[in-house]
């Protein structure tokens, strides 16, 4: 079971995977060692599966609400996949961007703590990129993490 502090740490790492232990300790009014110990405990329990720039948190195990959606986009001639990649490269909510063949030009996988965050990102894309069509498809179910880890 996760403590409230654990959940706060996970959310902070999901938003900024490069946050230092000292910054998190100051933010949550605990010691740096406490942050290190909590993160290590969650890593051992596979709640935190690993991280690079953005923490890869197993939200289901952590009990943190998470909204995942796929954006499917068609560009207006002149705008490109690479412009979208550049625009979204700093967003902690974007899990992947794929250029695809067929009716759509690309798919974007988004994970956020609320649909409001998803909507903000969608509006940001419309403000900056010339989009012909954008559909949002919510993810209804994920493959169980243990199934994927056994492969």
Image: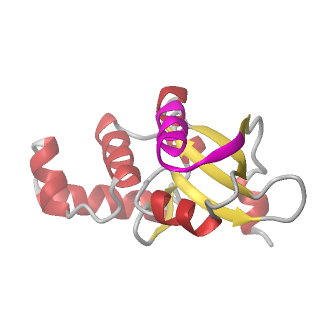
Residue extending farthest to the top is 116
Residue occupying the point 37% across, 50% down: 15
Residue 125 located left or right of residue 106: left
Colouring scheme applied when the structure was drawn:
secondary structure
Residue 28 vs 151, above or below: the answer is above
In the image, residue 99 lies in the stretch drawn in magenta: no
Q: Who is closer to the viewer here, 73 or 149? A: 73
Residue occupying the point 27% across, 61% down: 37
Give the tally of numbered discs: 0
Residue occupying the point 20% across, 64% down: 20
Q: Give the quarter of the figure containing the C terminus.
A: bottom right
Q: Which residues are magenta?
A: 119-133
Residue 39: x and y, percent? 34, 59
Residue 91 seen: yes
Residue occupying the point 75% across, 50% down: 144
In the image, residue 125 lies in the stretch drawn in magenta: yes
Residue 37 located left or right of residue 127: left
Q: Who is closer to the viewer here, 96 or 104? A: 104
Residue 117 vs 9, above or below: the answer is above
Q: Quadrant of residue 66 in the image?
A: top right
Residue 150 located left or right of residue 110: right
Residue 70 seen: no
Q: Who is closer to the viewer here, 91 or 129? A: 129
Residue extending farthest to the right is 102
Q: Who is closer to the viewer here, 122 or 126? A: 126
Examine the residues drawn in magenta and state their main secondary structure: helix
Residue 35: x and y, percent? 23, 56
Residue 140: x and y, percent? 77, 35
């Amino acid at each position: 079971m996760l403590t409230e502090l654990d959940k706060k740490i996970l959310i902070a790492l999901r938003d900024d995977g490069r946050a230092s232990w000292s910054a998190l300790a100051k933010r949550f009014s605990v010691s740096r060692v406490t942050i290190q110990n909590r993160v290590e405990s969650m890593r051992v329990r596979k709640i935190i599966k690993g991280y690079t720039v953005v923490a890869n948190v197993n939200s289901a195990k952590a009990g943190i609400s998470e909204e995942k959606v796929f954006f499917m986009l068609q560009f207006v001639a002149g705008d490109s996949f690479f412009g979208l990649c550049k625009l979204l490269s700093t967003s902690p909510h974007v899990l992947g961007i794929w250029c695809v063949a067929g009716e759509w030009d690309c798919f974007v996988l988004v994970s956020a703590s609320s649909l409001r965050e998803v909507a903000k990102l969608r509006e940001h894309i419309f403000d900056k990129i010339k989009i012909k069509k954008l559909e949002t498809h919510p993810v209804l179910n994920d493959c169980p993490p243990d199934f994927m880890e056994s492969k």
